[in-house]
Image (cartoon, rainbow, N blue to C red):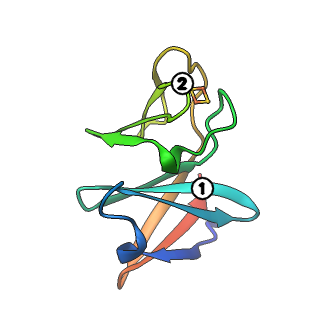
């Protein structure tokens, strides 16, 4: 059975970046607001030591701030070099403005 952990309020996600870095079980997780659809992936880029919450969000993708690798946020799939590894994704539930996460 899934374990749901509250990590933030929807309003905590920056309207400027569309992202928010939170922690779940000691792991950094990046939340994304895709025009009202909340998604979550691991925050650390698998290519290097960069936080995807500091990246550039566009059309359901996140561009890493360090070497501009791009990931599809919903699937976690890498879209262009130098990134080649999928992002870990988290299941998201929103209730009364609170965002809950569960490891997928
Ligand atoms: Fe993200 Fe290199 S650290 S693309």
50 or 89, which lies in front? 50
- Secondary structure of residue under mark 2: loop
Label 2 lies in ligand 1 vicinity (Cβ under 8 Å): yes
- Residue 57, given in percent of the width and then of the height, sits at 35, 43
Question: Mark 2 = which residue?
Answer: 67
- Between disc 2 and disc 1, the foreground one is 2
* Left or right: 80 as drawn, with respect to 88: left
Question: Quick check: 77 above or below 90?
Answer: above
Question: Quick check: 75 above or below 1?
Answer: above
In the rendered view of the protein, which quadrant contains the N terminus? Answer: bottom right
- Residue 104, given in percent of the width and then of the height, sits at 59, 51
Question: Mark 1 = which residue?
Answer: 29
| Count of residue discs | 2
Q: CA distance from mark 2 to mark 1?
A: 19 Å
Going from the N terminus, do you reach mark 2 or mark 1 first?
1
* Left or right: 63 as drawn, with respect to 5: left
């Amino acid at each position: 059975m899934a374990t749901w952990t509250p990590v933030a309020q929807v309003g905590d996600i920056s309207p400027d970046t569309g992202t928010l870095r939170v922690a779940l079980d000691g792991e950094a997780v990046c939340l994304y607001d895709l025009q009202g659809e909340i998604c979550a992936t691991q925050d650390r880029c698998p290519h290097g030591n960069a936080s995807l919450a500091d990246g550039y969000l566009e059309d359901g993708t996140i561009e890493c701030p360090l070497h501009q690798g791009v990931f599809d946020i919903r699937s976690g799939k890498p879209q262009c070099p130098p990134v080649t590894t999928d992002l870990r994704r988290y299941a998201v539930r929103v209730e009364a403005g609170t965002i809950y996460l569960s490891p997928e």
